Amino acid sequence: MKRKYMVCLLVFLIVTVFFTNSLALVEWDIQKTLKMEASPLDIAVSKDGKSIFVLTESGNIIIYSSSGKLMDKIDVGNHVDQIKVGPREDLLFLSSRKNKTVEILVIDFIRNIDITGAPFKGPVDAPVVIAVFSDFQ
């Protein structure tokens, strides 16, 4: 009887050690829900996590910031059925099974810079373009 009790205790300890360490509880919470005008077909996230690209059935790519703020919308046509982010942040790959094509879309984000109170020389409304060169080959 003592041996049977020891075997049961040993089996209980082994099961407890192996299974309680392998089971994990997962806590989750929906951070934000993006309300769409059209049904989403595909989603891609930029490598830096700052942009969310949602391809819709109506042929648009809707761009959101990581906080869920609508940034822009691009009309790519309803033949596109899948999107992927490229190795660089400014590339999107658009594939179409129907047309048997892959389109490479280069995107540039235009950002306004607030210069209120900054010193300047020349007309206040002079156009300024800042170009970023990130590929030095």
Image: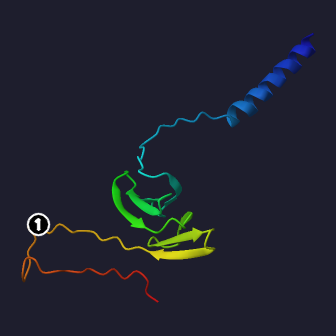
Q: Image quadrant for the N terminus? A: top right
Query: Is 132 placed left or right of 123 in the picture?
Result: right
Residue 32 picture quarter = top left
- Give the residue number, with chain letter if any, for mark 1: 116
* Rendered residue at 38%/51% (across/down): 68
Is 33 situated above or below 41?
above
Q: Which residue is at 41% across, 51% downward?
A: 37
Q: Where is 18 relative to 110, above or below?
A: above
| Few, some or many residues within 10 Å of mark 1 (<14, 14–19, 20+) | few
Left or right of 136, for residue 115: left
Q: Position of residue 70 (x, y in %)?
A: 34, 56
Q: Position of residue 73 (x, y in %)?
A: 38, 63
Identify which residue, 36 or 89, lies in the foreground: 36
Nearer the observer, 83 or 134: 83
State the residue in front, 58 or 22.
Answer: 58
Amino acid type, mark 1: Thr
Image location (x, y in percent) of residue 40? 50, 53
Residue 50 in view of the camera: no
What residue is rendered at 9% in x and 78% in y?
120
Identify the residue at horizontal 26%, vertical 80% (top origin): 130
Which percent across, then down, holds residue 77?
Answer: 48, 68
Residue 64 falls in image quadrant:
bottom left
